[in-house]
Image (tube, grey):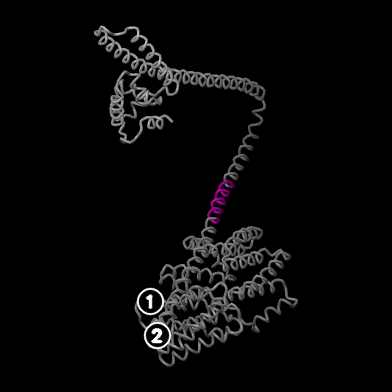
């Protein structure tokens, strides 16, 4: 039953139906063609725009809005101009054209400021309220309504506007499932709608009361509560016959649809109730037969008839009604996905009961497809609303800042006026001391300029001194780094010399040693190592420091010497010849260095050093 109610609630707000022409509307339109006064024409324009707007005939409603705007501007009637702008804004919102509404709000507010009529500002505020409500800003909507509602209640001529505001409050509390407050505001809207004489508003108010009475029925299941719901729906249905032409076919069809759906909430459908449900459904189909954009309501009527057929276990008739509903919905672009999902879902369940699994699967696939399309449509609509909310909040922030700035300028203006008065009072006394103050002012200005110049020079000198000290510090750092590199390189050289001297001492014990050859070989080694040292210092001043930082174990001076030779691209044989050792000893040293650097055995040392210093 809750699903049926949700389906009804959606139909109530989205279905589109063009009402048939009637004598009441024809009479209003003929009145515009007659030589009526401007005041009478404004009244007719408001009634016609309201009638066609609530019937969702937006092009016709907008045509009358433009005519009303034209007449209001020619008559310089700012209140009626605001009313036309408000109607135009509501039409745009009902068509999800959110970006076109803020300019209309601004125009309504600007026009309202041109007149002393309080009604104009109230209608301009109503458009802003409707805008916030459409964007889902419920709390902000309530604040805005509570702000202007006391002013509206003081205007006896604006009973309809009062009813609309209470109806919006009902809608907000209804969405919050606040049955108590929803009922309170629905009752107020009903009383005010009765006083206003607007039968379409009264029909909506009766439907709102039905929703409020349905809340306790959902919790208790007590048929007494459901009878109250049915009673309210019947009041809404009866308006169409009681006031011919004043209730649109759209509102009447929705009232019939509401009543039929609520009847389905009865656990047992008696023959009398069944007859009335069928009669209401057939009336809906008859009302919408010669109109356009009515697919949602027609599909709802066929859905109700299908429900009755299902209760009778007549699957063939139920299938027939559901297929008609599907065909009707497909003729509307865009498709009403909420209604279509219910229809194809019921068809899928029906075929599953018939064990026609192929068709059941086919329609279940359609359920998924339409759900995806509905989700995409909802996402797009949400994106539009979020963008509109962002722009609205941005505008409010800018307006607040502008207001604060205006207030500040106003305060400054009063301050300047006060200062001017004080200045005039003291002008006489100031005149006598004028020359003295002028001379003092010139001397003080020169002094200030001198002090300012001296301060600027002092700051400049301090900056230059800081820059010089920084440069000297950097130079000292570079020199220190270079000296450290040279010390490390010299240590390597000294160590090498000590090793050579030890070898020479050992070799001198051999009587056959050739001293000249040894000295010559040592000179060659010295020259080679000197070249190596300068090459490393030239390429990488911090070579030895960085090598020590990369090592995972402490490196000896000999290790550093090997690292330098390897980095310069010397192979094992060259290093062995240079250090007078066996190639095997060089290979062992390389293996030991890999361990100290934490390298894999297959890693080549010279490649590692090149990556480190690349």
| Residue 435 in which image quadrant | top right
The relative height of residue 96 versus residue 486 in the rendered view (above or below) is below
Considering only vertical position in the picture, is 68 above or below 552? below
Residue furthest front as drawn: 512
- Number of residues whose C-alpha sits closer than 10 Å to that of mark 1, classed few (under 14), some (14–19) or many (20 or more): some
| Count of numbered tags | 2
In the image, 347: left or right of 243?
Answer: left
Residue at 60% x, 43% y: name it: 414
Q: Is residue 571 left or right of residue 449?
A: left
Q: Nearer the viewer, residue 542 or 294?
A: 542
| Residue 197 visible in rendering | no
Q: Nearer the viewer, residue 448 or 355?
A: 355
Q: Which residue is under mark 1?
A: 216
The residue under the point 67% across, 27% down is: 431
Closest to the observer: 582 or 206? 582
Q: In the rendering, at what x and y percent does residue 466 appear?
A: 48, 20
Q: Is residue 216 magenta?
A: no
Q: Residues within 10 Å of mark 2 (few under 14, many from 20)?
A: few
What residue is at 29 percent from the left and 8 percent from the top?
Answer: 513
Residue placed most toward the observer, 473 or 465: 473
Nearest to N terminus: mark 1 or mark 2: 1
Residue 354's label in the rendered image is 2
Q: Is residue 415 visible?
A: yes
SS at circle 2? loop
Residue at 55% x, 55% y is 391
**Mark 1 vs 2: CB contact within 8 A:** no
Separation of residues labelled 1 and 2 (CA atoms): 37 Å
Residue extending farthest to the right is 35
Residue 67, percent across and down?
Answer: 70, 70
The residues colored magenta run 391-406
């Amino acid at each position: 039953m809750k699903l049926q109610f949700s389906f009804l609630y959606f139909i109530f707000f989205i279905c589109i139906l063009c009402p048939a022409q009637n004598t009441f509307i024809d009479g209003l339109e003929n009145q515009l063609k007659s030589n009526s006064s401007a005041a009478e024409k404004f009244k007719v324009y408001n009634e016609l725009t309201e009638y066609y707007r609530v019937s969702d005939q937006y092009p016709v409603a907008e045509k009358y809005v433009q005519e009303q705007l034209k007449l209001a501007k020619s008559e310089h009637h700012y209140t009626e101009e605001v009313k036309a702008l408000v109607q135009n804004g509501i039409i745009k919102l009902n068509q999800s054209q959110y970006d076109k509404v803020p300019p209309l709000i601004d125009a309504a507010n600007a026009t309202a400021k041109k007149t002393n009529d309080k009604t104009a500002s109230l209608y301009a505020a109503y458009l802003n309220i409707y805008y916030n409500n459409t964007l889902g800003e419920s709390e902000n909507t309530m604040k805005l309504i509570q702000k202007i509602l006391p002013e509206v209640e003081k205007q006896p001529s604006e009973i309809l506007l009062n009813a609309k505001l209470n109806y919006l409050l009902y809608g907000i509390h209804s969405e919050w499932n606040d049955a108590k407050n929803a009922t309170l505001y629905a009752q107020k809207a009903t009383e005010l709608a009765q006083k206003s004489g607007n039968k379409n508003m009264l029909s909506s108010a009766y439907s709102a009361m039905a929703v409020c009475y349905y809340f306790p029925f959902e919790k208790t299941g007590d048929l007494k509560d459901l009878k109250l719901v049915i009673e309210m729906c019947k009041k809404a249905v009866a308006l169409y016959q009681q006031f011919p032409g004043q209730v649109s076919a759209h509102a009447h069809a929705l009232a019939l649809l509401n009543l039929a759906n609520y009847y389905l909430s009865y656990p047992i459908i008696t023959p009398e109730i069944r007859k009335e449900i069928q009669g209401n459904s057939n009336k809906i189909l008859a009302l919408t037969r010669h109109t356009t954009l009515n697919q949602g309501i027609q599909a709802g009527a066929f859905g109700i008839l299908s429900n009755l057929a299902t209760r009778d276990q007549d699957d063939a008739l139920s299938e027939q009604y559901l297929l008609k509903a599907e065909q009707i919905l497909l003729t509307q672009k865009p498709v009403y996905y909420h209604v279509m999902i219910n229809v194809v879902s019921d068809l899928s369940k029906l075929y599953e009961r018939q064990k026609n699994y192929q068709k059941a699967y086919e329609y279940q696939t359609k359920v998924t497809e339409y759900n995806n399309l509905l989700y995409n449509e909802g996402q797009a609509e949400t994106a539009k609303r979020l963008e509109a909310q962002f722009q609205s909040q941005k505008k409010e922030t800018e307006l607040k800042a502008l207001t604060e700035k205006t207030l500040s300028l106003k305060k400054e203006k009063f301050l300047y006026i006060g200062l001017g008065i004080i200045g005039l009072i003291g002008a006489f006394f100031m005149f006598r001391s004028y020359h003295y103050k002028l001379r003092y002012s010139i001397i003080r200005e020169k002094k200030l300029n001198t002090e300012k110049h001296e301060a600027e020079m002092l700051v400049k000198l301090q900056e230059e001194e800081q820059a010089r000290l920084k440069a000297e510090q950097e130079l000292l750092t570079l020199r220190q780094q270079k000296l450290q590199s040279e010390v490390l390189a010299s240590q390597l050289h000294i160590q090498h010399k000590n090793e050579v001297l030890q070898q020479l001492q050992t070799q001198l014990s051999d009587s056959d040693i050739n001293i000249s050859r040894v000295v010559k070989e040592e000179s060659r080694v010295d020259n080679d190592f000197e070249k190596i040292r300068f090459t490393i210092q030239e390429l990488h001043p911090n070579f030895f420091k960085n090598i020590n930082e990369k090592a995972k174990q402490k490196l000896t001076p000999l290790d550093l010497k090997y690292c330098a030779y390897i980095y310069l691209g010397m192979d094992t044989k060259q290093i062995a010849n240079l250090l007078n050792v066996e190639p095997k000893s060089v290979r062992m040293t390389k293996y030991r260095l890999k361990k100290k650097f934490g390298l894999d055995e297959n890693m080549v040392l010279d490649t590692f050093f090149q990556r480190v210093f690349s």
